[in-house]
Amino acid sequence: MTDQSTESTVTLTIDGRRVEAEAGTSVLYAALDAGIYVPHLCDHPDLPPYGVCRLCVVEIEGVEGLPSSCVTPVAEGMVVQTQSEQITQARRLAMELLLAGHPVDCGICQKYLNCELQSLKQYLGVEESRVKRRSKLLPVNNSNPLFVYDPNKCVLCGRCVRACWELRGVGVLYYKKQGKEFHIFTREGASLAESGCRFCGACAEVCPTGAIQDKEGLIKGDNRKAGLVPCKSSCPAEIDVPLYVRLVKEGDYPAAAAVIREKVPFPWVLGYVCDHPCETECRRGEVNEPISIRELKRFAAEHDDGSLWRDKMTPKDPTEKRVAVVGSGPAGLTAAYYLRLQGHDVTVFESLPAAGGMLRYGIPEYRLPRSVIDSEIKEIEAVGVKIETGTRVESLDALFEQGYEGVVVALGTHKGQKLRVPGANSAGVLIGTDFLRDVNLGNEVAVGKRVVVLGGGNVAFDCARAARRMGAEEVNMACLECREEMPAGPDEIREGEEEGIVIKPSHTSTRMLSEDGRVTGVEFLDVEAFFFDEDGAPQIDVVEGSLHALEADTVIFAIGQRPDIPEGFDLDKTDGGLIELDEFTGSTSREGVFAAGDAVSGTASVIKAIASGRKAAVAMDKYLGGSGRIDRKVAPQVEVPACLGPGPGFAALGRAADRCVIPDDLTGNFCEVVESMGEDDAREESTRCLQCDLRLKIKTVDFWGSF
Amino acid sequence: MDYDRLKAEATARRAGQEPVCGARGAVVDVGAFERRVALRNLGRVDPGSIEDYIVTCDGYSGLHRALSIGREAVIAELEKAGLRGRGGAGYLTALKWRTCREAEADEKFVVCDAIDAHPWTRTAQTLLGGDPHSVLEGLLIGAYAVGAAQCFLCVNADYREQIALLRDALDRMRDCGLLGHGILSSEFSCDVEVCATAGSLVAGEETALIRILEGKQALPYLRFEYPAVQGLHEKPTLVNNLETLAVVSALLQGRAGAPMAGDTKIVTICGDVEREMTVEVPLGMSIGALLEAAEGASLGELGVKAVQFGGPTGAFFAAGSPASGGVGGSLDTPITFEHIEAAGSVMGSATLRVVGGGPDGVCAVQMARDAMAYLQEQSCGKCTSCREGTLQLVDMLDDILDSRATAEDLELMLELCEAMRTGSICGLGKNAGAPLLSALTLFGDDFDAHLHDGHCPAKE
Ligand SMILES: Cc1cc2nc3c(=O)[nH]c(=O)nc-3n(C[C@H](O)[C@H](O)[C@H](O)COP(=O)(O)OP(=O)(O)OC[C@H]3O[C@@H](n4cnc5c(N)ncnc54)[C@H](O)[C@@H]3O)c2cc1C
Ligand SMILES: Cc1cc2nc3c(=O)[nH]c(=O)nc-3n(C[C@H](O)[C@H](O)[C@H](O)COP(=O)(O)O)c2cc1C
Ligand code: SF4
Ligand code: SF4
Ligand code: SF4
Ligand code: FES
């Protein structure tokens, strides 16, 4: 042969049509690729051919009987018929046999309308059955995390077994016989976890029936694919978590950092303080404990040399458009960064002496070292974002007059609140955010020896722990919620208690006790129940006769804060005093003014502020005539192997131990309290990941309707 | 160590040796109808003494000869003898060996199938218990011919004694330089591992056996390529039955003689008989004649209803001459691959399971039902047609027994048998219909009695 292509290409005839196919292809795929539908069930494009369901039978000239097209390789000059009376009969009998032990009622199955078996049954028009139908009456197995197996729906197509052995190389699923009936299970009938399952979900993904399904409620949202990788979809900025976790596992830390950098300019900050909604959703959490996603982020950032992203994240050609950003918190700086990369001329105005917003003036230093904030802000300035600190913006008109064509308002929530109770204005009663700002500014703060903090969230803990560091000897924290429902994260609560903070849950304060205008204590009632009524208004049931008091020389309110929006901004606000945004355009009530961060959402989180800053940048860029496409691929594209290998002990691997170190003497000590993860720990932790994203690479089988 | 020294040393050692197991040089009672090739040394050799095998049985002279004539000549010799595999399918051994030899790979394997998967067969038990070295010698010859350096001898795990004997034999071979590096001072290096394998009907099937060796579940596989090209760990793998290998060593030793080698078969006679026995007989003898010779009585006296030949998937054979073309045959059917195949069956394990009680003793429907029920129990569950077909057929045969079935059911039964034949991966499913179909051919009246008259002929 002379022509290269003819060596690897085979020409055959299917249903009278000349069809070309790669040598080694099965007749089934030669037909499907040519748009000729041949029913098939046991075959799956990602799995080795099996030849057991017999739905794909065809006639081939010169071949006895009806060969299964999925296990017959194409040959030069082959003549294939995919439809005939005899073929239809054989396919129907095969379908009747598959359905003999399968439940009759499809309507009550979760897989209804997404079931390959159902679709094939309709295609073949098998309603009546000549073979006897029966109920297998096998028990449904609900005992494993993540998946449910209903052997009664199983048609023994063997896809899950092949996915487990051949695709993933894990090897825990077996054919099993119970009485006369077969089902699929682990070798010794042990749990999936004990058998070395890696919980990759390939079995559930390839199952053509409703036999193996994801547990109800685990896959959230309308987008099934996104729901399968909840760490990524629950990240407000949609950071590709499984990808960077995998890169840490492989030891490519700069690449891991680059993946995070594709979505956020603050990987390192997030590594310290992100409230990690991803970990709450992480599927590993169903098996034992979620992946330490945040710690791995910090690890990646700490081991980043910038080599993969720094020279790719540079501004596009100048657009000659000027943008002002009000507020240098994470929302404002994120918006500024992406707008600058889109080629605009961006200036950030900040009323406080340094940039960073609540990162610097809310979150205390022992949780987030200032050098970390500085270094990430330096990268933002390095692309040309100008930051004017000590400059409070009072009027948007003034900015437009100065020639700015657009403004992003991201001024956070900096106005703290006090409860309206008697004595709230006594000396020694402070507001949390003001207190923390003073601490962070290094201002003189008058903290006594006995402090009561009112509030149960993270801000309250920051106040309490900062107070300890400012010299308080006894710190009580009182909140309305019961212990289980305190809004602060478990880490924060544990660390706070380790630092000697006493938590008084289910407490409502009735008044501040004072002497000579100075606070001396707080009076409380115990809370029986705290809930929100139908209108969302808080309701408190108190315990009769539970009045009691705590002595204090300082009381700090940490019960929420609101934006402080200057009159001159002239923006529409919500009932809660937040900036109102148009749902679709993301614009405020004023043309050319966009908003982001806490000022829009109320005090939320750094990652939400960043995500919101990204949105504002997109909207603003489009407003200024840009494409709004702010994402850049900077991480190297890697081919991910489908094979995971055997996983004995995998399920039991525990989450990396907490590395919190509380100093013995807290006074004046603002050193960081959580140590970095070591390389071995990081590699081990990343190994625990179930790699939920691999499942998305499994192809979906086209139903006959699409032919 | 070269062959002469091996023999000299063995002779010297043997002189001072007590028999290890069994009597040495005992007189063996061989039936006049027998012809022994694979079982040639049975009862004559001390299975626990490699020296005895070397000195009195020309042991390892076949390997020695193979090493000197070269690979292709070894295969040519098998070809000339027309040797067909004794594992059941009767594939031409030389062809398989050549395919494997010509397959290009950095590594090849040989697997010896000594599972005795069929419940009544005793071939491996007999051969390995009585003369393990003639199998091991054949195994090494195979490895040499195809170019493999690692062999696996898969023995039914129930055969504890045989396994112990084999492990000991391997140690002795290693001591004598018959395993390991540079065997018999040649360039040929090889090792053998004995694998105790859980027996089941499918475990004996070669692709399932390969899976077991890979640490996977015993499920037969459909492949684009033969195991000889792509087998264990995707490498060319020669799979042979142990009887085949024992014949190979006989052939290469030059003792069997070319015409003889291809024409015997070890058979096991069982069921309703006086005495179960495993013997080697010349091919061509009829089923009935063999039975009469073995039992020393005429068929009439024996009161045979039918003989299921070839194992659980074998067809029934019975007195008289059934119409040709259908499955099943007469007891006059000669035991040859061709004749058995012509009766719609396979050589399989060449067991003769006698169903006694005379023509009216047992109901053929019951006979067919029991055969099907066993296959249902043994089906590995992979193929829809075999898994579900056997289950449905048992059910339908029960209906016939209870006289609840109709002629339409019979039609569906035939269709199911055909679906199993064409739609199953391995021999179990492919041949699962044979017992039923042959019962229908031979004993249609029994079925009719149930279907039309609603009574069982055996219960009159
Ligand atoms: C004590 C505390 C602890 C927290 N801990 C965490 C945590 O651990 N994890 C987490 O995810 N989130 C935490 N948060 C929440 C998080 O810090 C915020 O959600 C986030 O910083 C909001 O970002 P932002 O950019 O919207 O606003 P901010 O960070 O508040 O930034 C707004 C900036 O605008 C400036 N500004 C305001 N008005 C003007 C004006 N008129 N002109 C110029 N500048 C102005 C402010 O000075 C400020 O610097 C915490 C918040 C607090 C208060
Ligand atoms: C269900 C089934 C069971 C089998 N059991 C055995 C067995 O126990 N021993 C054996 O040697 N071959 C058995 N075979 C045949 C093997 O698959 C294979 O054909 C044979 O070992 C090849 O060796 P040969 O060429 O020497 O005959 C079985 C086949 C099937 C379908
Ligand atoms: S569980 Fe699903 S994929 Fe597995 S064999 Fe049953 S039907 Fe097939
Ligand atoms: S296991 Fe890994 S991929 Fe799955 S949700 Fe958790 S972090 Fe994400
Ligand atoms: S024919 Fe039966 S025993 Fe053989 S592979 Fe198929 S299901 Fe298993
Ligand atoms: S798709 Fe071909 S046999 Fe199942």
Image: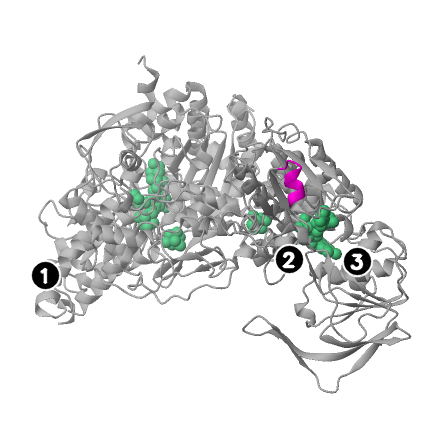
Q: Magenta stretch: residue B18 in it?
A: no
For the N terminus of chain B, the image quarter is top right
Q: Residue A434's mark?
A: 3
Which image quadrant is residue A110 in? Answer: bottom left
Extreme residue toward the bottom, this view = A545
Q: Chain of mark 2?
A: A
Instruction: Confirm or reject: label 1 Cβ below 8 Å from ligand 5.
Output: no
Q: CA distance from mark 2 to mark 3?
A: 17 Å
Give x and y (percent) for residue B289: 19, 47
Q: Which residue is mark 1?
A: B445
Residue, x 8% and y 69% (percent of image)? B453
Q: Residue type at mark 2? A: Gly
**Which of the two residues, B385 or B378, is positioned nearer the viewer here?**
B385
User: For the magenta stretch, what is the residue range?
Assistant: A397-404
How packed mark 2 is, by other alpha carbons closer than 10 Å (few <14, some 14-19, many 20 or more), is some
The reply to whether label 1 and label 2 mark residues of one chain is no
Give x and y (percent) for residue A496: 78, 62
Residue, x 48% and y 46% (percent of image)? A695
Q: Which residue is mark 2?
A: A602
Residue, x 27% and y 45% (percent of image)? A704
Q: Mark 1 and 2 residues: CB-CB less than 8 Å, in contact?
A: no
